[in-house]
Structures are given as C-alpha cells and as structure tokens.
Image (cartoon, grey):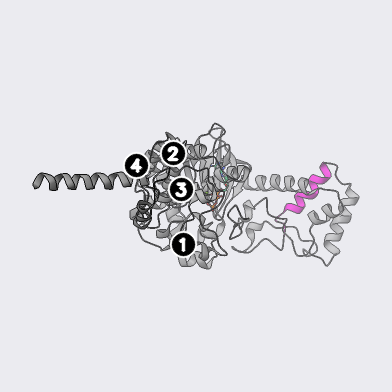
Amino acid sequence: MTTEPRPLESPDDDIPALADSSAPPPRSRKPSPGSTDGPEAERPAGSQAGSTTGGFDTVLGKRVLEAGLVTEDELEQCRAQVDEEDSDRTLSDLLIEHQFLTDRQLERLRKEFDAKKSSQKIPGFRIIRKLGAGAMATVFLAEQLSLHRQVAIKVLPRKFSEDRNFIDRFYKEGRAAARLNHPNIVQAYDVNHAGDHHYFVMEFVEGDTVYDRIQQVKRIPEDEAIEILIQACRALHHAHEKGFVHRDIKPKNLMLTPSGQVKVADLGLARNLEDTEAAEQEKGRAYGTPFYISPEQIRGELTIGPPADIYGLGATAYHMVTGHVPYSGKSPSDVMRQHLKADLKPPDQINPVLSAGFCLVLEMMLSKDQSNRYRRASDVIDDLERVSRGEEPNFARPKLDLATLAVQVSQPPEPVELRAKPKQPGGNVSPVLVTSIVLNLLLLVMLVIFALT
Ligand SMILES: Nc1ncnc2c1ncn2[C@@H]1O[C@H](COP(=O)(O)OP(=O)(O)OP(=O)(O)O)[C@@H](O)[C@H]1O
Ligand SMILES: [Mg+2]
C-alpha cells in the first residue's frame, strides 16, 4: 500500500561546508594521531564526507563538556578510544554508545554546528537553521542582516560550480525570477555565490508544503484541493504571462501558509531537466522525482511550455485527492514510461467521493497529448470555479463513447439518479434523453415527408 512517492534517489547532500544536518554522522576513518579534523571544504570537490568529521568532533567535545554532559576524564577516555580503536567510530559514536549523549541531543548539536559553519560562509546572512533538502540543494532559514528580515537560502552543492552552463542559467533565471511579483509565488530576492557555493535567496514561507499536508491527511478533500489548485493556477498564469515555465511543479514545491495561502516555490530556478538520458543515468537525481513530470519533458522536447506545468499540477492534484501519484513504478524509467503510455486510472475509482466534474478537470490536466490538455492556467481556474459552484466544467468534456451510447439506446431507460454535484455525462449520457431525441427526429422526418407529399 504505497500512498506516497517512494524516493527513487537519495537527496544530494554533497554540500561540505553546509552539510546536511539530518544526515547521519559521518563515519570517519580513524584520524591519524595528532591530526585535527580539517574543514571538509578543503577536500577535493565531490569527495564524500568520510575521513573526517569536518571539525564537528572538536566542537562537540567542547560543547558536551560545557554542558556538563561529561567530565574531562570521560571525554578524554572517549577521545583515546577514537584514537586507539581499529574501528571506524567517531567521538559522536562513542558519546552515544556510552550514553553521555542521546541521539536527539547529538542531532541538535549537529544542527547548531552546521548553522554556525554556514553563517561564516555567506556574508550578510546569519544562518538560523536548516529548513529542508531536496535532490539538488539544501535550504536554510537565515536572517538577512542588512534588512533584519528572515529569508530562505537555497545553497547548491559545490559540484554545480563546475558546470558553467548550469551556473549561467542559474544566474540568468534567478535574476529574471526576482522581477516576478505575485502573492502566490515565493518571492525570489537574489542569486549570488560565496566561494564555490552558489545560492538563491528567497522569501521565507512559514508553513508546510502540500506534500506534508498529504502525509498528514492522506487525501485532501476536494473543496480544499480546488482552493489550493486555483491559487497555484493564479501563480502559474502570472508566470506564464511573463514567459516563465516552472517545469517542476510537485507537492513539495507548493507551500501552504497557516492562513491558507498557497506559494509556488522554485519558480525561475534553473534545473537540469533537459537531458533526460543523463537524468536517467543518474537514476532520477537530476530530476528529483519523476512522478509529476510531463510527457513532453520526458521526451526531451525542445520547447517546454505552460501545458507542462499544467500536467505537473494535474499530477500533484491527483496525488492530493487520491493519496496516490498517477503512476508509480520500480524505477524512474518505469514511471516515465507510464507517463508516456499507460492509461490513467480514473481518480474516482480510487476516491469515489470525488465529483465527476472535478475528475474531468484532472483527466484533462493529465492528458498525454498536449492538444487535449488545457493550454492556459486561466482555463483551469475557470473550470475549477465552475466545479466548485456545482456546475459542469467548460473546457473539460467527457469523451463520447459511441459504442456505450448504442448499448444505452437499445436498453430500457433507467431512472435518473440525482447527485449533490452534477455528474458529468461521461459515457453516461442519459438514455431517456437519447431516446427522446431519436423519437423527436423521427417525428420531424415524418412531418417533413407529410408536408412534401
Ligand atoms: N522559501 C522557502 N521557505 C520555507 N521553506 C522552504 C522554502 N523553500 C524550500 N523550503 C523547504 O525546503 C525543502 C527543500 O526544498 P528544495 O526546493 O531544495 O527541495 P524540494 O523542492 O523538496 O525537492 P527538489 O530538490 O527535488 O526540487 C522544501 O521541501 C521545503 O520544506
Ligand atoms: Mg523546491
């Protein structure tokens, strides 16, 4: 029973100076006697934390002593063990093992350490804590010292600085995004770099992501989902009008403030999406997750337009209301193959309380063929507003299945079922209506013949 996208890749936490504080403590090889933990930033780019603890153990020793968690003797004993043992254990491991420290205390100390280390790396900002990490970067809450305001800073791993094309795009798109201004878009403030670390400064949004919300409630009720989707569409419409395509709409990029405002994150953030082959080789790393990606992006089409974002939002909406991603599989390529070829399981087969009109909107957003998909986010808003008023959508129409229609005509009429929300006639055109049309046509033909003769 998988209700959430399984991560198909581990987050990239190769950010030496701004190490992922949620990562397990680096398992260091035994340091050579007398050596101190040198800054990880001095390691060759791309090397994994492994042979040192990046200075953490040194600071940890001081902190546990200050806090009275160990005596000097106990600390010395642990340090001696680190030096003497053949095992790979670090000071953190030993402090935990001897129960001087709990896992939670260690995690807190590590966060503190990371934040402090980071703040030395980005001039003008004081890092407060880590907010999260994705496939591409780590996001920190920080104070912008000059303006005394809280901001979120997305820091790219150092390896990105080696890709000149990517960095050029990162700056170009980041600067352009800073000119976008909309209440439903996370405001971009700046792009810059500190040493080899490139970063993106943006509005700090207090609250959860839609992904967190799905985790909490499993299925978001239709009316709440419609409200979220309308706001997300307003953001997309604005961005599209200004020539931006997000290309990575997914539950983790939709943030929800406590007052119910939706903020689309990462708009204008350049990403490595174009090279599907490379992405596949990296097993989804360059992509993040492929659960919400449009067929045209998978095909690597050159022009990716607004419909790609509408597809991503459709996949997000499907996940929101059914608790399942539209397509899941064993590997990124399996999921992507289904985006290209597999039939979509109708959302109301998973969640029968969904209205027919809403399902039609979802299905149209998720059309594989762009010509059958909404072209503009404003059209999606139009349909969603209609559905929320209990009306039929304007753009999303049921597919007329002639075979079903023929069977229905030949069968005796059934009583018409009344629904709270009007069920769209999808393969369910009322037989009474069809029979009456046919009879009326016959009558008309007879009248014409009668008049002519
Ligand atoms: N502006 C922001 N304000 C507050 N929290 C944020 C902000 N931007 C991102 N976050 C938090 O940081 C986490 C990581 O964000 P990030 O954009 O790096 O990764 P992601 O969107 O989860 O995944 P991916 O890297 O695959 O796009 C988010 O899930 C969110 O919880
Ligand atoms: Mg994001």
Instruction: Look at mark 2 in the image and give the residue it sits on.
Output: 230
Q: Residues within 10 Å of mark 3 (few under 14, many from 20)?
A: many
Question: Which of the two marks, 1 or 2, is nearer to us in this view?
Answer: 1
* Residue 395 placement: quadrant: top left
Q: Residues within 10 Å of mark 2 (few under 14, many from 20)?
A: many
Q: Is mark 4 on a helix, strand or loop?
A: loop
* Amino acid at the residue labelled 2: Ile
Decide whether residue 381 is among the magenta residues: no
Q: Residue 396, how many percent across, how many down?
A: 37, 46
State which region is magenta.
Answer: 52-69
Instruction: Look at mark 3 in the image and give the residue it sits on.
Output: 313
Q: Is mark 3 on a helix, strand or loop?
A: helix
Q: Which residue is drawn at 70% across and 44% down?
A: 112
Nearest to the observer: residue 34 or residue 400? 400
Question: Which of the two marks, 1 or 3, is nearer to us in this view?
Answer: 1
Which numbered disc covers residue 82?
none
Q: How crowded is mark 4: few (under 14 residues within 10 Å), some or many (20 or more)?
A: some
Q: How far apart are marks 4 and 1 (CA)?
A: 26 Å
Q: Is the CB of the residue bearing disc 3 within 8 angstroms of ligand 2?
A: no
Q: Which of marks 4 and 2 is nearer the N terminus?
A: 2
